[in-house]
Amino acid sequence: AALLTSSIILVAVLFGGLLPQGLPPEAYLDRFGESFGRIFLTLGLDDIYRTKGFLLLGLLLFAQLVVCTGKRILLLRSGVKTWLIGSVLLHVGLLVFLVSTAISLWWGNSVMVEVAEGKNMSLSQQGVPFDLRLERFTIDYYPDSHAVRQYRSEVVLTRSGQELRRGSLEVNEPLSHAGAKIFQMSYGWLVEG
């Protein structure tokens, strides 16, 4: 049963990884059209990791792991096979992972936005203590190659129009400010009109 639950969770995670998450509703209506966009939003696929179905699957997996871990601990206590120690540690590690993920999803705040170069993005309306302006986006290439070395965004953080901080975002090098971390996640064409 835990294998089936894990498989369903894996499919949901793949789906959430392939489709953009956390964008404003208008973005999904623009990208997928009115009909598919509405279905996408109604099913909660714009934030799949916070849907009731995904959270219920996580709870089910957690309960299955607790039962399985308890059985393995009982076998260990009865003196059966010391190789079970690794299995118990693995299961306990998965339980810790699930609890920490649940805490992050429940109490954490994650916002994904698309910002065009030279434009402002109001993040304060989404619970972030500042707004963001993308000054410049650049792509650095390796010498004599078309291979990308780094993506870089030059940003300005503001609050009520006042500049708080300037900084650079690079892949795996977030900018931290006021307890929030800003990551460069991807880039692409942003159609405006």
Image: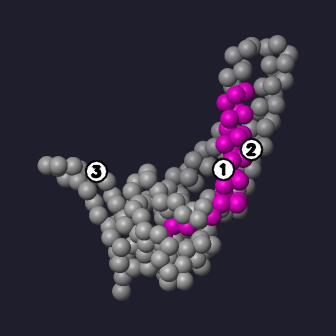
Question: SS for tag 2?
Answer: helix
- Mark 1, Cα crowd under 10 Å, few <14 / some 14-19 / many 20+, is few
Q: Is residue 37 left or right of residue 71?
A: left
Which residue is located at x 42 percent, y 64 percent?
A: 167
**Circle number at residue 41:** none
Q: Are marks 2 and 1 in contact (CB under 8 Å)?
A: no
Circle nearer the N terminus (1, 3): 1
Residue nearest the observer in this picture, 4 or 104: 104
Q: Amino acid at mark 3?
A: Arg
**Circle number at residue 101:** 1
Q: Is residue 82 left or right of residue 155?
A: right
Residue carrying label 2: 62
Q: Amino acid at mark 1?
A: Thr
Predominant secondary structure in magenta? helix
- Mark 2, Cα crowd under 10 Å, few <14 / some 14-19 / many 20+, is many
Indicate the position of residue 158 as horizontal and vertical percent values: 50, 76
Residue nearest the observer in this picture, 193 or 175: 175
User: To which quarter of the image does residue 3 belong?
Assistant: top right
Rounded to the nearest whole Å, what is the CA distance between mark 2 and mark 3?
Answer: 40 Å
Residue carrying label 3: 149
Which residue is located at x 50 percent, y 62 percent?
A: 182
Which span of residues is magenta-colored?
Answer: 88-115
Question: SS for tag 1?
Answer: helix
Which residue is located at x 69 percent, y 16 percent?
A: 83
Image position of 9 with respect to 167: above or below? above
The residue most toward the bottom is 193
User: To which quarter of the image does residue 178 belong?
Assistant: bottom right
Circle nearer the N terminus (2, 1): 2
* Of labels 2 and 1, the one closer to you: 1
- Residue 87, visible in the rendered structure: yes
Indicate the position of residue 32 as horizontal and vertical percent values: 45, 74
Image position of 93 with respect to 55: above or below? above
